[in-house]
Amino acid sequence: MTDTNTIGLHEASASQLAEKLNHLLANYQIFYMNVRGYHWNVKGPQFFELHTKFEEFYTDLLAKVDEVAERILTLGHKPVHAYSDYVELSRIAEDKDVHDGEACARGVLEGYQTLIELQREILALASDADDEGTAAQVGDYIREQEKTVWMLGAYLG
């Protein structure tokens, strides 16, 4: 009997990665809902610009929610799927009743910064576990999101 899963990773490492990926999934779900709320509720002189940009962000976040959940399944584990679990596991808090364009943009910036921090933790675990699949996935996310953080920082001045 072997201690590896169906994709050849040590089960202990796969379990640890799946747990951390479930935390990432929770953060993506909460952040997705925050950005969706910014899209719906933003007001102010940058409405048209921000409304469109927030839709771009939440569409990408929703795709990543599915990709992260499928990676957890690929590792042989189950993704959490209850909103109460997302709230409990997420470092990103629900952002309620935000309307001001600058406050919304700042919420997006802080959300991406949190995702990057968590993904770097997962990248280190994946590297230690020789899990190229997870490392490549979160590495791609980090690269994309670092550029978004730079652009949001420039936007906010």
Image (cartoon, grey):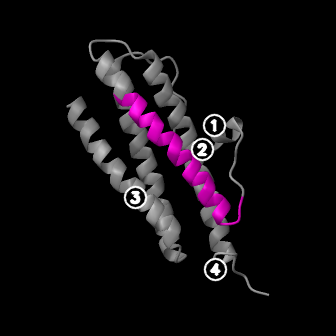
Image spot of residue 44 (x, y percent): 31, 12
In this rendering, is residue 79 above or below 137?
Answer: above
Of labels 2 and 4, earlier in sequence is 4
Do the residues bearing badges 4 and 3 touch, measured as CB atoms within 8 Å?
no
Indicate which disc, 2 or 1, sits on the residue closer to the N terminus.
2
Asked if residue 139 lies left or right of residue 87, the reply is: left
Whether residue 93 is visible, yes or no, is: no
- Disc 3 marks a residue whose amino acid type is Asp
Give above or below for 23 relative to 13: above
In this rendered view, identify the residue nearer to me: 32 or 113. 32
The kind of residue tagged 4 is: Gly
Vertical comparison of 73 with 45: above or below: below
For image coordinates 69% across by 80% down, the residue present is: 4
Residue 1 image point, x, y percent: 80, 87
Q: Residues within 10 Å of mark 3 (few under 14, many from 20)?
A: few
Q: Which residues are magenta?
A: 53-77
Label 1 belongs to which residue?
87
Label 1: which secondary element: helix
Quadrant housing residue 33: top right
Which label belongs to residue 140? 3
Looking at the rendering, which quadrant does residue 52 occupy?
A: top left
Badge 2 is on which residue? Answer: 26
